[in-house]
Image: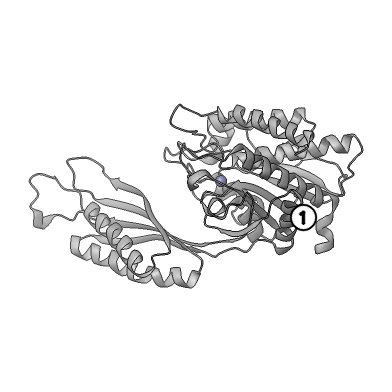
Amino acid sequence: MDSAAQKHAASLTAIFDHISAVGARAGEGVTRLAASAEDGAARAIFADWMARGGARLAHDAVGNQFACFDWAGENAAWIFAGSHLDTQPRGGRFDGTLGVLAAGCAALDLHTEVQADRFRPRHNLAVVNWTNEEGARYQPSLTGSGVFSGALPLREALSLTDGAGITLSDALAAIGIDGETGGVPPRPKAYVELHVEQGRILTVAGRRIGVVEGTWAARKMMVRWIGRAAHTGPTPMADRRDALLAAAQGVAAFEALIAARHPHLHRSAARLVIEPNSPNVVVERATVWFELRGLDVAELDRAGQPVLAAFEKAAAETGTRLEIIADTLREPAGMDIGLMAITGEAARACGFEPLPLRSVAGHDAVALQNSGVPSALIFVPSVDGIAHHPEELTHPEDVEAGLAVLTTVLRRLAEGDFDAER
Ligand SMILES: [Zn+2]
């Protein structure tokens, strides 16, 4: 690595450590929920860092932040690069944050060359921090990129409420975001995101750079069993309609059925809400969030049929009523072929043999790609595949590799390399 690249890797480490301290508690990772005070503080550090480097800052009405480098004039097309600064509760430092800050470093690197007249881009560049990618505080996830790409109406997004009944609109206003400011750039010609893999495919293959070909499909079900509240003491057993018992049977049947018939599907029941949630009241309502992920939508469809029958059986056996609140299928996405080729070449130019792979999780790059913005997603290794956990880690040499490849890709895109591919 040359000295300029080393300097930029060092400046990435400095800003990364600075932002990672926001919302951090010893042993508990980082908690920076979307539009919280901690998220606001991280956004301010990012904005200040970019502004000092010469960027013009803007944000849209859903709070997506844009650090804009107007290199090629107002009529030129835009290239976006970024990810998200929000985290899960007790999340890791790298998920999302690495992508935003690496894109910032790459942009500053290129901007230095533009100012020295060593680089004359044909396109403008914006570094983007997308609002509420994680979906921890507000569901659905990918809120900011969903609004920008047109998949989620703005009004719907702003009226989402968190567990405490606070709307996204009010939460954003509390951190100083109330409507659009500063000239938000138009839909870009291409979007590039660097992200940690959150799996162990790269490590097992002994590679540093993954080029994502596409994502897995996902089926998400929100299921509720409705029984009847009753005293846990005197109520005769035969009279009880216990929604928690039904949910427990449903969760166990879900795992048993999928494990037996579709063991390769990733699955979870990761959230349970019971009401009234008192030790002395038989549970009246139990709501469970189920998730199935695999490569093939048809398989997810098939796999769900006996599961729904098992949910009905759990209801019948407990005297409760089943309600399917939501049951959505997310198609697998394919990333842009031309950008995959450019990313692969950039990796090789930096000395890394890229590994094509599929992403199990959704990312902002997938939301943009699905809306018709050609997008690339670059992975760097996650130690032991740990994700959404305080021990999440990507080694410094892998961060440097990712930064080098991202910078190379953005240079080529800003030069207009992608235009020839179209
Ligand atoms: Zn992420």
Q: Nearer the viewer, residue 20 or 243?
A: 20
Q: Is residue 111 above or below residue 314?
A: above
Q: Nearer the viewer, residue 202 or 68?
A: 202
Q: Is residue 290 above or below residue 161?
A: below
Which quadrant, please, contains the N terminus? top right
Residue lying farthest right?
Answer: 117
Crowding around mark 1 (Cα neighbors within 10 Å: few <14, some 14 to 19, many 20+) is many
Snapshot quadrant of residue 18: top right
Residue 21 in percent (x, y) is at 55, 27
Q: With 219 as the anchor, is 403 left or right in this view?
A: right
Q: With 76 as the anchor, is 265 left or right in this view?
A: left
* Number of numbered discs visible in the structure rendering: 1
Q: With 299 as the anchor, is 379 left or right in this view?
A: right
Q: Nearer the viewer, residue 129 or 102?
A: 102
Snapshot quadrant of residue 239: bottom left
Which quadrant, please, contains the C terminus? bottom right
**Would you say residue 197 is visible in this rendering?**
yes
**Would you say residue 181 is visible in this rendering?**
no
Q: Nearer the viewer, residue 286 or 30?
A: 30
Residue 119 in percent (x, y) is at 88, 42
Q: Amino acid at mark 1?
A: Lys
Kind of element beneath mark 1: loop
Residue 35 in percent (x, y) is at 55, 36
Q: Is residue 263 above or below residue 49?
A: below
What residue is rendered at 24% in x and 67% in y?
313
- Residue pointed to by mark 1: 189
How was this image coloured?
A: one colour
What residue is rendered at 80% in x and 47% in y?
411
Ligand 1 contact, mark 1 (Cβ < 8 Å): no
Residue 44 in percent (x, y) is at 64, 29
